[in-house]
Amino acid sequence: MKASAWRSNSNSVPLLKIARVFVTFCVAALAAQATPTLAADKEVTIAYQDMMVPWRYAQQLDEAGKETGYKVSYRKFGGGGDVIRAMASGNVQIGEAGSSPVAAGLSQGLPIELFWILDNINDAEALVARDGSGVSTVAQLKGKRLGVPFVSTSHFHALLAIKNAGLSPSDVKVLNMRPAEIAAAWERGDIDATYIWNPVLSKVEANGKVVTTSGTIAAQTGLATFDGFVVDRNWAKANPQFMATFVKILAKGDADYRAHPDQWVGTTPQGKAVASVSGGTPEEVKASLALYQFPTPQEQSSDKWLGGGSASGAAKSLTATADFLKDQKTLQSTLPDYSVGVTDEYVKAVATAR
C-alpha cells in the first residue's frame, strides 16, 4: 500500500505519521515498564542469625528490596558456620557471620569479602555457668560440659578463655551445639555451662552466673570478636549498586539507634522488629542492644576496622582467630594475609558522604 493511501483527505494529518507516533509511544511505554521488571528479576538471598541488632528493623520492612527493586529472600541460620557453608554452596550471596567463621571460610579459600561490621560483640557474648554446677571461674570448667556453637565467635573466645585459665580443650567436655540446642539442653540440665549470645544468653542467665564475657577477654588478650556481613566477591562485583544501597541502609539503622536508643525498646516498632526477627522477646531488646557496640561508617572505614589493608583491625583479628583455630586443630591451614577477605570499598563511600 502506498503512503498516500493512508490519507482520509488532502487536509488531514498523514496516517502513516500517526502510526509512527503511536508505535514510538508504545515502545517508550514498554521501555519504561521494563526497567522495574528487569530489576525485580534480580534476586539475592541474605542469611541472618538471631543476634539482636538495629538492622533487624530494616530487614523486617524489606528496605533492601524496596530501595533496589531486587527480590530479597531472608534465610535464618543457627550459627555462622552454617552461613559460611551455605555461601560455599552458592545458595546464599550475603550473610551474617562472626569473625571466627569468617576466618575459617577465608582459610578454606572461599571467595568471600567482609564489607560491614554488624557489631563489636563486646559483652553480648558470655560464658555462663549453671546455678549449682560448682563453676564460678573458668578454671573450674575442668571435667564439666560446655555447650557452644563450633567455629563461632563464642567458640573462639571459649577456647581462648580455657587456654588462659591453664586448661586444655580436652580438660573440658566442649560440645558442639546450635543456640536452640543449647537452650533445650540447658532446660534439661544436660550441660553445666555455655558460651552464647542473645536471645539464649538472657534465658540461661535466669538460673546461671556470668563467669566472663567477650569484652573482658578482649581486654585481657587484645583479641576482640565481631559479627559482620560478608558477600560472595563475584556477586558483589556484578551488583555494585545493590551493595552501595545495602550499606547505606545498614548505616542508617545503626545511626538511628546510636542517636535515639530510647526508641529501640520492646514497645516501639523498631524494638518489636528486633525481637520478632531475632526470635527473642520484646522485654530483652533494650538490654541486649546495650551489650553491643555499633561502629560508625567513619570508624569502619578507618584502620580500626576495615581500612588499611593488612593493618586493618578486622584483618588482624581474622589472622589471630585463624591462627588460634589452627592451634586447636579446627583449621588445617591459614592464609598469610587476611586482608584479601576485607574491603572498605562500600563503607568508605558512605563515610565520606555523611
Image (cartoon, rainbow, N blue to C red):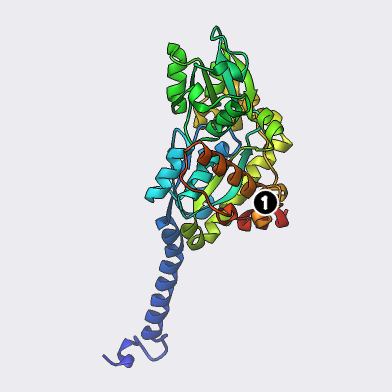
> Which quadrant holds residue 209?
top right
Question: Where residue 258 sits in the image (x, y, percent)?
Answer: 71, 37
The front one of 99 and 49 is 99
Give the residue at the far left of this rendering: 1
- Which SS class for mark 1? loop
Left or right? Give the position of 194 relative to 165.
left
The front one of 199 and 319 is 319
- Residue 311, compared with residue 47, is above or below; it is below
Q: Is any atom of residue 281 visible in this view?
A: no
What's the amino acid at mark 1?
Ser
The front one of 163 and 204 is 163
Question: Where residue 211 sits in the image (x, y, percent)?
Answer: 63, 19
Question: Where residue 298 sits in the image (x, y, percent)?
Answer: 72, 50
Q: Residues within 10 Å of mark 1 (few under 14, many from 20)?
A: many
Q: Is any atom of residue 171 visible in this view?
A: yes
Left or right? Give the position of 45 relative to 274.
left
> Which quadrant holds residue 13?
bottom left
Residue ID at (40%, 71%): 26
The front one of 34 and 352 is 352
- Residue 270, compared with residue 338, is above or below; it is above
Question: Where residue 334 sits in the image (x, y, percent)?
Answer: 52, 49
Location of the N terminus by quadrant is: bottom left
Task: Name the residue tied to disc 1.
Answer: 312
Residue ID at (57%, 37%): 57
- Residue 288, compared with residue 251, is above or below; it is above
Q: How many marks?
A: 1
